[in-house]
Amino acid sequence: MAVDDRLEIVLRGAEEVVTREELRALLDRGGIPRAYVGLEPSGLMHIGTGFLVASKVSDLVRAGFHTTVFLADWHAYINDKLGGDLRAIQVCGEYFKDAFRALGVPDAVEYRYANDFVGHPGYWQKVLQVSKASSVARIKRALTIMGRKEEEGELDASKLVYPAMQVADISWMDLDLAYGGMDQRHAHMLYRDVAPRLGWKPVIALHTPLLPGLEGGGRMDPVDAKMSKSRPDASVLINDPPAEVERKVAKAFCPAKGTEGNPVLEIARTILVPRQGTLSILRDRKFGGDVEYASFAELAGAYGRGELHPKDLKAGVAAGLNRALEPVRAYFERHPENLASLRAVLASR
């Protein structure tokens, strides 16, 4: 595949790359570059993690990267996920593997746990190197990668270890590209800050948008407004049955003619139109009949002009999500074990 084509595949749907020139140079060098995305296994997966991450991981594989999905179990333990029970977190990690397979991530992807290498003294040496090369203030600014505020570092000193671990992970796995949502930017920039001082190679940072929660966030910071399974009615889970998807989307924030900060439109922009190429809306003939939008710009323009009612947009997005989730449901019907194990863990809490 030509370098320009590979570059386009890596960058499609991305919100930011640091930097495009470095990415182009990496692809020009040939060979098999190494990329990863790090995720805390912490419960049932929502569509923001599921569709956006699965799509970009698949893009990286297609563009010729050896790609690792890093199941950050020790990081989730530090972050108090699933009650800080490491075994429960690893049960969730096995479910995450199934979730990505169900979402179409290629078998070529490598799955790794932090537990695979935390027993190596060399790893902890890297963690200490990052810590010594960073001020406490700089580490605290990076706590947002955990969904935490800076001041929360005062509550539990282990939280301050987390950003240094994430930077050390990138070096330990000998990566060329670190991928994540925009909420992971602070960690990737921390790596880029300390790498020259530690003699580590530069690593490209690639970020995709954050899908907002269904309750809407107005002018809220995108990290604070992002979809989270901790707010059940504000998130669509990949394992939600069709009726539940319809119910959640039907009650979502979706102001008439409002195209900014509209989570229903964002689902169309980031998930449905890229996956399906179009968005179809089924309407009663007295309201104009069925309509199909060939691009997100066309959809947003029609909605902003009031040509599409919020109820019809919600119905079209819910139907589109349910179509996209059909293969996921089919996969888990064939492979129910890890999902059942996770649900048993969640029910016990």
Image (cartoon, rainbow, N blue to C red):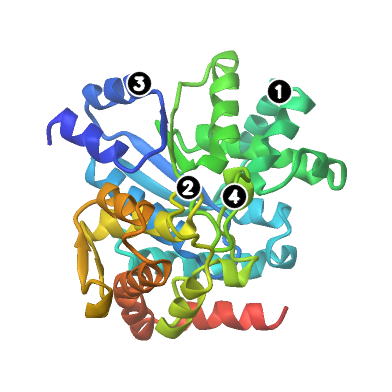
Q: Residue furthest toward the front? A: 286
- How far apart are the two marked residues, 3 and 1, measured between alpha carbons? 24 Å
Mark found first going from the N terminus, 4 or 2: 4
Relative to 291, residue 115 above or below: above
Instruction: Quarter of the image for the N terminus: give it.
Output: top left
Q: Are marks 4 and 2 in contact (CB under 8 Å)?
A: no
**Circle 3: residue type:** Glu
Identify residue type, mark 2.
Glu
Q: Earlier in the sequence, mark 1 or mark 4?
A: 1
Task: Indicate which disc, 3 or 1, sits on the residue closer to the N terminus.
Answer: 3
Relative to 108, residue 312 above or below: below
Q: Which residue is mark 1?
A: 134
* Residue 58 image position (x, y, % from top left): 30, 51
Q: Nearer the viewer, residue 187 or 33?
A: 187
Q: Residues within 10 Å of mark 4 (few under 14, many from 20)?
A: few
Which residue is pictured at 60% across the width and 27% down the height? Answer: 190
Asked whether 319 or 65 is in front, the reply is 319
Helix, strand or loop at mark 4: loop
Indicate the position of residue 50 as horizontal and vertical percent values: 43, 61
> Residue under circle 2?
260
Alpha carbon of mark 4 to alpha carbon of mark 3: how far? Answer: 35 Å
**How far separated are the C-alphas under marks 4 and 2?**
8 Å
Residue contact between numbered discs 4 and 3, judged by CB atoms under 8 Å: no
Q: Is residue 142 left or right of residue 67?
A: right
Q: Which residue is mark 4?
A: 218
* Residue at the disc numbered 3: 22
Viewer-nearest residue: 91 or 115: 91
For mark 3, does the 10 Å Cα neighbourhood hold few (<14), some (14 to 19), or many (20 or more) residues?
Answer: some
